[in-house]
Amino acid sequence: MIGSLYSGISGLKANTSAMAVIGDNIANVDTNGFKASRVSFANIFSASLSQNNLQIGRGVTLNGVNPQWQAGSLENTNSATDLSINGTGLFVVDDPSNGITYYSRAGQFEWDKDGSLVSPDGFIVQGYSIDPATGAVGGIDNISLPNGTSAPNPTQNISFGMNLDSGAAAGDTFMSSITTYDSLGSEAILDIGFTRTATGWDWAVTVDHNNPAAASASTGSLVFDAAGDLNPAACVPANANPTIAVTGIGPAADLNITWNYLDAANTSDGSITGYTSESSKTAQSQDGYPSGSLQSVAVDEDGYFTGIYSNGSMIPFAQIALADFPSYSGLAKQGSNLYAESLSSGQPLVGPPNTASLGSIAPSTLEMSNVDLGTEFVEMITTQRAFQANSKVITTSDEILAELLSIKR
């Protein structure tokens, strides 16, 4: 009977621990990225009555507490730095105080006073640095905001959608202007004047720039065939897109701008026509821009962080890193939704999102807890009943022992 008392006690202990796990799951039902745990029990064998080939158990023990790594549902937010993972993987964060690396599914990040992307605990999110000038991807480092000002981009190409009236009289003129940018981001307005000739239209470029010495010696002519299409062989320059050279613009570098109206085969791309209708410009484009200030940051499903500037430029500056493990159940819980590598988890495989086994990034979302309240309440009821049953074993065994003691009387 003494043995049955200890069996009952083991049941009380095991179910008390199970109830603690259930309570922890329910308490974290609103914790972002939380993974519910499940308990497993094992019987205790300690006696064998060999003469009767009987094996008597000695109760139960808590065999393990295993986290359930199924993904939680995603909740939309208004913050671009709230991130969740669609699929496998963990975010990588570093503790700046000691350099220790942790891992997490909770992606509630924000920019700190130093411009670093951090977790609520101040741990810095890790990713791959990207050179804004060349786009080259570097090694893993802290994700930080780029310089608040983007460099200007000098204009290298322009194009027009334009018709020049084939019915115009010789000497008639038409003017078209386009704003371009030098290497310092200053505006250089190109005024292209067209003059009707007997064979087509001559053109010449003048420059309206903040430096009065700026000038362009670029000239040429456009000639059309009977269908109103450009005849590249008769144009000046022949069979080539002209280059507009802007010189004397002060400390900025001289501009050499290609005016594109021929395709790769040196035939007309259809942007400039010579029909019998009023000369007009319907479209224009150029690829330069001035310097700009950082306005916002966007994140895509591949984990690229892109700075959006006031000049309209969008420049990637980092890509977030994810880590995959051979055994997620072996990760060591550290609190605050953090995990650490252990011998049981194996070493992490770190890489960009959407590569190998790693999932993609869902920006402006947070992964919710995967706790199922219905399941937890059922487990709570069964654990409570198991606890009551084991306590009944103890009280019944005590009654039997009391009855045995009363025999002596």
Image (cartoon, rainbow, N blue to C red):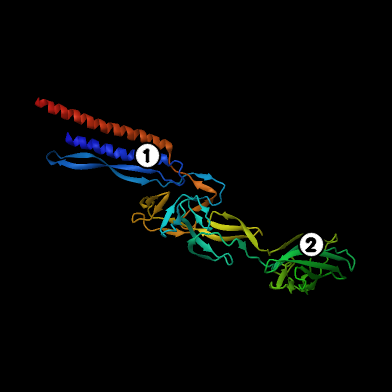
Q: Is residue 154 left or right of residue 51?
A: right
Q: Residues within 10 Å of mark 1 (few under 14, many from 20)?
A: many
The residue under the point 86% across, 64% down is 166
Q: Position of residue 320 (x, y in %)?
A: 50, 57
Using the image, determine if residue 38 lies above or below residue 304.
above
Q: CA distance from mark 2 to mark 1?
A: 73 Å
What amino acid does circle 2 point to? Met
- Which residue corresponds to mark 1? 22
Query: Disc 2 designates what residue?
Result: 162
Q: Is residue 70 above or below residue 341?
A: above
Q: Amino acid at mark 1?
A: Ile
Q: Residue furthest left?
A: 408
Q: Secondary structure at mark 1?
A: helix
The answer to which of marks 2 and 1 sits earlier in the sequence is 1
Res. 382 image quadrant: top left
Query: Residue 109's spot in the image, x, y percent?
Result: 51, 52
Position of the C terminus by quadrant? top left
Q: Is residue 114 above or below residue 210?
A: above
Q: Residue at position x 82%, y 67% from top?
A: 193
Looking at the picture, how far across and down is residue 263, in whole percent?
Answer: 71, 67
